[in-house]
Amino acid sequence: MMTSYLLKPGELTLKGGNRELFEKILKRNLSAMLRLSGARVINAGSGRYYVRCEQDKEDSVEHALKHLFGISGWAKTRICEKQPEAVIEACVKEAGLLFEKGIRSFKIEARRTDKSFPLDSYKIRCQAGAAVLKALPGLKVDVHRPEGCIEVEIREKAYIYGNARRGLRGLPVGSSGRGLLLLSGGIDSPAAGYMMLSRGMKLDAVYFHAYPYTSEEARQKTLSLAKILACYGMGLKFFTVNFTPIQGRIKEKSPEAWRTVLLRMAMMECAERLARRKGAKCLVTGESLSQVASQTVENISCTQSRLSLPVLRPLIGMDKEDIVRLSEKIGAYKISILPYEDCCVLFSPEHPILRGNPAEAGNLYEALDCDSLITEALKTAAAEKCFYSEAGVSEHLIGRPQI
Ligand code: ATP
Ligand code: MG
């Protein structure tokens, strides 16, 4: 038995002349995610795609559809011939499934792009609705707030499906250029990465660690977060850069209050150099205005003052509670809150500067003379590839004893 899923396009329907390109990327992404399942992505014309798979591959397909940017919704669909009786019968069967799930009110939605179909969309709704009510007297119609919605689309074939799932929306990854995410083990940066992926940006990630002051476990935790993003982002490369010598230089040569801002400046500079090498056109961070001392608008001016690539901060105006909710939604939260040490916390000043002046920051940064240290750090950077995977993300990390 084969199963079919219908995909509803999202924002890409607005893309005018570029629409074809966006659709091509969407199809390429989904095909890549489904490569191992043997499922096929089929273009049904006029912006509609569907997926066909063996019944035992439904979990694989649904996992992919739950991680795919660029679709507003999806549903397991019946496909039948364009005959009114067949369509109505399919609606009744679909209603039966909803009823089994405990749904007691419904409506029928119908769209007809093939105008040669003998019933117009109003008549489809009326006749299918009446047939459902007759077959399942326990159901009632509610056009305003139905518990279940059965949709009929008459296109090159007839598609009938119940309660379509909401897609992730956004744009297909790979349609909006490439960025480099500064990924820490915290809550914010994975959420920031997710936001940019949702706008179609392809991401790589860089993690700065301070080995041996921060542990390999802390790095593994961040790698797990990268793997979660890889599931939404068509894979990503995870770079690990050792910042111990640079942190040592900052500690030795600069006023304590400035340490965090100077560390951020060094991270940004290093990330920018890496980004240029990898063809990324921007940096992405999880900064949120005034969440911590280094994220006041003055200190943000300091940390970006020496950069020429744009720094995108998708969380800048978001409330922490909303960020946590997003982090939970993408499955990152339970990993982000694991209590491994962070390289910044280890040498954070007790009284950090709150309103740094970019000129002063520039002078202090110059005095560090850390150019060659950054070059060296990049030379020894490690790269790991993370792939889309259905396996779940490093579950072994969760519940590990605290250190
Ligand atoms: P996060 O939860 O993302 O760690 P945060 O609220 O803890 O954010 P900071 O630690 O001040 O804030 O970091 C601000 C941003 O700088 C992070 O969102 C991230 O983009 C970047 N960053 C911080 N530490 C690191 C690190 N060790 N490696 C890579 N990027 C980092
Ligand atoms: Mg942090």
Image (cartoon, rainbow, N blue to C red):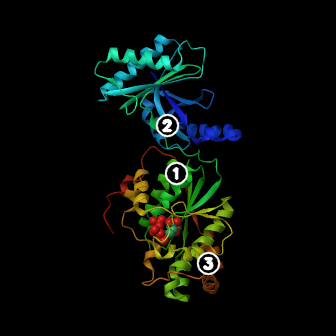
**Residue 73, disc:** 2
Compute the Cα span from label 3 to label 2. Answer: 49 Å
Task: Give the quadrant of residue 381.
Answer: bottom right
Residue type for callout 2: Gly
Q: Which residue is mark 1?
A: 230
Front position in the image: 128 or 206: 128
Residue plotted at (55% across, 46% down): 170
Q: Is residue 212 among the parts visible in the rendering?
A: no
**Residue 373, disc:** 3
Q: Nearer the viewer, mark 3 or mark 1?
A: 1
Image quadrant containing the N terminus: top left
Under tag 1, what secondary structure? helix
Residue count near mark 2 (Cα–Cα under 10 Å), binned few <14, some 14–19, many ≥20? some
The relative height of residue 219 versus residue 391 in the rendered view (above or below) is: below
Residue plotted at (43% across, 45% down): 391
Circles 2, 1 touching at the beta carbon (< 8 Å): no
Residue plotted at (37% across, 63% down): 338
Under tag 3, what secondary structure? helix
Answer with mark 3 or mark 1, whichever residue precedes in sequence: 1
